[in-house]
Image (cartoon, helix red, strand yellow):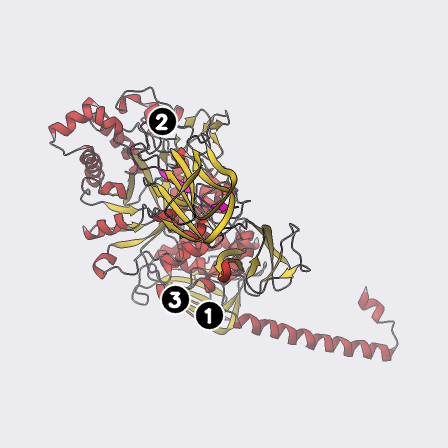
Amino acid sequence: MYLFAYKFLPNRLQRCCRQLLVHCFYCCIILHAAAQTKETDAPPALIPLPVQYTPNNESFIINPTTAIGCDNHLKPCADLLQGYIKAFAGWQPATPAVHPVKNYILLHTDSNAIKQPEGYKLTITGNNIDLTANNTAGIIYGIQTLRLLWLQKNKQLQVKGCTIYDYPRFAYRSMALDVSRHLFPASFIKKYIDLLSLYKFNTFHWHLTDDQGWRIEIKKYPALQSVAAWRKETLIGHKKELPHVFDGKKYGGYYTQEEIKDIVAYAAKRNISIIPEIEMPGHALAALSAYPALGCTGGPYAVATFWGVFDDVYCAGNDSTFIFLQNVLDEVMDLFPSPYIHIGGDECPKTKWKTCPKCQQRIKDLQLKDEHALQNYFITRIEKYINSKGKNIIGWDEILEGGLAPNATVMSWRGEEGGIAAAKQQHAVIMTPESHLYFDYYQSLYATEPLAACCYTPLEKVYSYEPAGNNTTAAIKQYIKGIEAQTWSEYLGSNAQAEYMIFPRALAVAEIGWTTQGQRNYAGFAERLRQQKSFLQKLQVNAAGIFDEIQYTPAIKDKKQLQVSLTSSLPGGKIFYTTDGSIPSLKSKRYTDDINIASACLLKARLFDGNSQPVNRTFQQLFTIHKAIGAAVTLTHPPVEKYNPGVYALVNGVNGNSKYNDGQWTGWSGDDAEIVIDLERVTVVHSISTHVLNYHWQRMWAPTHLEIALSEDGVAYTKVYTQNKFSLNGINTITAKFSEHKARYIKLTALNKGIIPAGNYGAGGKALLMLDEIIIE
Ligand code: TNX
C-alpha cells in the first residue's frame, strides 16, 4: 500500500524519499555492524567455563537447510542435536547419509586428536560447525556447549564463530535427588537429567528408597508397591516444631520398571549414568512396613510420616534380610547399567541390634567386636554379592564404621574427614560435604525464603568449595574422583520448589566439577550466570535469582557504635535505604558508607540495577540498641564450632533468627554457658533479656537452670534473676526485670541439659544450649 501511494508523489518528493531510504539503509547497516562487532567482542556466557575459547569474526546460522553429518556410531548424538534444534526453533535440520560441502554440522570422534576422555573441540566458522571429540560423551558435551551458545539468542540459531577446546577436571560430576520424602513425576526426572547434561554432569544419583516411601517397582515383592510406597500422611511445617501437625492425606507412588527403563535410556543419550540407591541397613522403615519379618522385632511397622532417623532398621542377624536385598538388587542391577550401586549405609542406629537375639547371635558366631562391626559385616556381605555381579558399591561415609568393605567407593557427607580417611585406605572418594553441597539447606537469610531443612549455603559458598582440598597431598588427591550435591526432598513439596533449591546452585557444582581450579572465580561465574537467567527461563526452570541480593554485616566501631555495612554482588547495583519502616525507593537515602545505628530501628534496603530497576526482595533487619552494645564479653566455656560466631554476636544489637542460621546464635554442646559482660563503668540497670532455643528435634535443649547476677567489682555478685522452667518448644524469651541496680559486670549462667535423655532425638549425645543477643537496659 505504501509503495502504491509513493507512485503518486511529485518527482522531487520521490527523490527526497529515495535519499531518505538510502540513508536509513546505511544507518541500519552501520547499526547492524556495530551490534555484530559488539556481539563478537563479548565472550559467551558458558557454564561451566571451557578450558580454551578462541573467538573468530565469523558466525554461523543454523537454518532449515543445515545438515547434520556424523560418524555412523554417532547417529543417536545427531538425533539428540536435531531434537534440541527442533525444540528451540520448531523445525529440524536434515541428517543426510552423505554430508554436504557447506552449511553442515559434522560430528565425529578422534581419540588421537582429542586425548582427554569426555573432551571435545568445537569449531564454528561461517561455513560449518565441526565437533570432534574423544568419545561419544565428548560429542554430547560439545552439543551441549553449542546449545548454550544458541540459547543466548532469541529464536534465531545464530552462533558466534569460535574454537572451543574443552575437557573435564573430574571424572565424576553428579547431582542427587531424593524421591522418597517427596516424589517427582517421570517428566520432571527427565527435565532434571537434561539440565544435568546441559551443564556437563555425567551422573545422576537417584535416592529411591527411604523411611518415608519405597519408589522403585520390584516385581518379586509386590508389597513394596502396595504398602511401602505409601504413607498415611505427611508432616506439615518444619520437623523441629512440636507438636507435629499432619496433613491427613495419603501420599505416595513409585516408578514402574517401564518408566525406569525409559528414563535410563533417556539419560544414556545425554551421557548421564544413573546410580540407583537402595538404602540399607538404616532408613528402611518403608520396606519393613511391607515385610516386617525383615526387622529385629517383627513389627508392626508403618511407613514414616515425618523426617529423621528411625531406630527400626533391617535385622542383621536374619538371613532372610540378605535374601530379600539380593533379590531386590537383582532387579535393580537389571534395570540400571551403571557399574555402581549405592547401598546407603548412613545413619543406622544400633539400638535395635543391641537387644536383638539374632543380631547378638551373629556377633557371637562371627566373633565381631560390636554392633559397628556388625554394620561392616552387613555392608561387606552385600558388597560381595554386588561384586559377584560385576558391579561395585558406593556408600555414605558411615560405611567406614568397623572397617571399609574392600572395593567400596565412599561418599563423604559429614564433612571431608570420611573421604580423606577412605582415600588413605586407597578407596575412591566422592566429595559431598553437607557444609557446602546440601541443597535442602537455605540459600538466603531473608525471612520470606520458603521453608528449608536448616543452615545457610548461599551460591557463593557452594562455588567456593574445592573437592580436592587445598592442603591435600597428591597421594590423597588421586582418590578423589569428583563431586556431587544432594537434594534431599523433605521440604521440597513441588517441582517448582525443587528447581528453586537446585538452580542455580547446581551450576556452581557443574563448574567446580568441570573447570580447572585456576580458571574459577566467583565474580566471573556470577556474571555468566546473570546472562543465563533468560535461557533458564526459556527452559522453564524455576531458578532462584536472588544471589545478588543485599547482605549486611553488623560491626562494632569505636565508642561502641554499631555500624552496618550493606553489600550486593550486582555490578553497578545501587542500594537505597530507610530506617522509618517505609519501603525504600530511588528517593530514599543512597547507601554509600557504613550506616551508624544509634537507636533501635528497622533497617530496610532495596537494590536497584544500572537501569534503576529494583532487583530482588526488600532487605530488612531489626536492630536493638542497649547498654551492652560492643561491651567486652568473656565466656568460661568455648562454644561449639558450628555456633561460635564470636563474642560480639551476643552484644551487637541483632537477635538470632528462628532458623538459627544467621550467625547470631551462640551454642554450647554439653557445656554450660557462663557469660560475663563488662560494661566498663558502673551503670544503672533494671532489665536483662535474651532468648534460648528449645528444639529437641535439633538437639537444642533449653537450660535446666538460668540465673543472672550483677557486680560492681567483678568479685562480689548479687543474684537478680533465676529461671528453671522453659516453655516446651520453640524460642523462649527470657526477661529479667528488677529494681534499679548499679553494676559494671553482668554474669549470665545457663546450665546445659548435658546428655540427651533416652527416647529423644539424638539420645545419648550432647545437648546444644543456644543463646542470642543479651539485651541490657
Ligand atoms: C541426612 S545425608 C541424610 C538424609 C537426610 C538429610 C537431610 C545422608 C546420607 N542422610 O537422610 O535427608 O540428612 O539434610
- Range of residues picked out in magenta: 758-777
Q: Decide if residue 180 is on the left or right side of residue 584.
A: left
Circle count: 3
Which badge, 1 or 3, comes first in the chain's sequence? Answer: 1
Q: Decide if residue 679 is on the left or right side of residue 319.
A: right
Q: Amino acid at mark 3?
A: Gln
Q: Decide if residue 343 is on the left or right side of residue 645.
A: left
Q: Position of residue 771 (x, y in %)?
A: 43, 42
Q: Are marks 2 and 3 in contact (CB under 8 Å)?
A: no
Q: Secondary structure at mark 3?
A: helix
> Which is more toward the observer, 611 or 224?
611
| Mark 3 residue crowding within 10 angstroms, few (<14) / some (14–19) / many (20+) | few
Q: In the image, is residue 676 part of the stretch drawn in magenta?
A: no
Report the disc number at residue 224. Answer: 2
Q: Which residue is mark 1?
A: 162
Mark 2 vs mark 1, foreground winner is 2
